[in-house]
Image (cartoon, coloured by chain):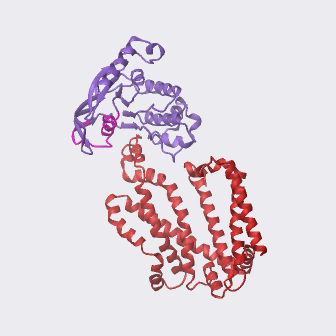
Amino acid sequence: MTAAWAGAALILSGLTIILLLARTRTQILLWERAAVGRRGNLLAQIGGLMVFVGIWYLGHSLNPDGPTRIPTPAAAVWAAVNLLVNGGWVDVLASTARVIAGFWIAAVASIVIAFTIALRAVTATAFSPPLSFIRYIPPTAFTALLVIYFGIDELYKTAVIFVGVFFFNFRMTMDILEDFDVRYVELARLTGASYARQQSSRWLFANTVIPASSPRLWDMLRINLSFAWTFLVVAEVVGAQHGLGKELYLAQRFFRVEDVYACILLFGLIGYASDLGMALLKRVLFRWHDDATRR
Amino acid sequence: MQRVDSAIVAIDEAAFAFGGRRILDGFSLELFSGQITAMLGPSGSGKTTLLRLISGMDKVAAGEISIRTSPGQTPISYMFQNYDTFPWLTVRRNLELSGETNPEVICDTAERLGLASLLDRYPRQLSGGQSKRVALARSLLARPAVLIMDEPFGSLDVRTKISIFEHLEVNVSDETRSTLFVTHSVEEAVILSDRVLVLSGPPLRIIDDFTIHSPRPRRDEFLASEQFKTAESRIISGLLGA
């Protein structure tokens, strides 16, 4: 009963903070977030977190015991801390390393292949349909094949993440390139004394298409990084010595509900941290871009 | 007075159609060295298409467009209406794209156009007028045979406009170059150009073509002169009849 009251109190307090902020800042739209102010944004985030935790407490009050229980947020956090100090950090490291390897190999391969294909209209027309067709096959459908070809060791896990991310990246990169504003090419062609050099497709591609597309490609990678974590869980269910996905699977198998929540919390935290890292890197890498100063 | 002796751009019976519409049909024109030519005409008459054909972005379906250049000279530099800079390059790197690699020359041109303190900034940190000046500096550094400008002064304040006029007047009226610009401002055309073309279309045709003989710079006194008023009313009559 205490948890229910605590949950209700948190939800009400959080909503009050958000509504009070929204009432005094009615004219500020999503895109003008900076105008809310640092303190205002922090308060809004705290309010949102209170609502989220409050709902969780309410859920716990509805189902506090038994094998299908919902633990309190505090119990889940405590379980996560316990997991980490009792060797779970090795699982976190192993999972992170797998995601980094699979995701970045897929990122480089998909972008390089998409750019190579997009360089010529004929190759784009020829290869886009089959690669787009493959994209519609659920990546998990390939896991059986990947086990056959790569076994169940590290190569298999990297391959699952690679397949899971590659086709999304490829199609989105093609879309970004098709959306590219060709007027930059015209401007580059007609802007300089290095006239012959600036007529070459290769030069134009390297000096207009790549830099102009880069911020959007970075945003694409930021979005698709979450898919890499999704497929990590699929990959680690099979034959993993270490990994958060393996921990999650074992915790579920033995009804260690708090540990299941702990793994989910850790996935969320690592994902949030990596997203934050990508956003910060965007500010450094694309200082010229209008959006670089916004999150 | 600038020399007007030979055609840098020669358009001979050019034809071009787009979306089933004839934009140019047997259109001919010569642009001469040492001249600034202004083109005025209703929106959609085909002025920008003509600029695109001269610059080689589009190809004529019939006829011929030829550009005479000195050995090693850049044929065309084009100042677009809305696209003047590369946002991912600093002002300095934008200017280097002109092909000019001597930092002293770049700094000197930047200084003359009031860009010296902005060389390490990105275009998003510039005002509209500053971006236009970057585009002009890059065009001047490229030393093209033909400098094309599509409504270059549309969104600029008077001070910026006058400062750009001064640089065009000093730098562009030489015998190795012809400058062609599209404008909707009668005043800009008369103040800046040696030759005015009033156009109608499509298909594009020349309604009036006349020369303005008056020393530069043309400022307050000229604006109050009979010559300015005559030129102004001649353009307006042409445009009303277009």
Range drawn in magenta: B43-65
Query: Chain A colour?
Result: red
Image quarter where the N terminus of chain A lies is bottom right
Q: Position of residue A73 (x, y in %)?
A: 72, 73
Does residue B177 appear in this view?
Answer: no
Going by the picture, which residue comes out furthest to the bottom? A254
Q: Which chain is purple?
A: B
Q: Is residue A269 magenta?
A: no
Looking at the image, which is closer to me, B38 or A15?
Answer: A15
Query: Which residue is found at the position 66% from the left and 80% from the top?
Result: A260
Left or right: A64 in relation to B121: right
Q: Is residue B56 magenta?
A: yes
Q: Position of residue A88 (x, y in %)?
A: 69, 79
Looking at the image, which is closer to me, B111 or B46?
Answer: B46
Q: Position of residue A133 (x, y in %)?
A: 38, 71
Numbered label tally: 0
Q: Quadrant of residue B195?
A: top left
Q: Quadrant of residue A275?
A: bottom right
From this view, report whether residue A287 is shown above or below residue B117: below
Does residue A1 appear in this view?
Answer: yes
Q: Position of residue A174 (x, y in %)?
A: 42, 61
Looking at the image, which is closer to me, B46 or A59?
Answer: A59
Image quarter where the C terminus of chain A lies is bottom right
Left or right: A225 in relation to B14: right
Left or right: A121 in relation to A142: left
From this view, report whether residue B75 is shown above or below residue A126: above
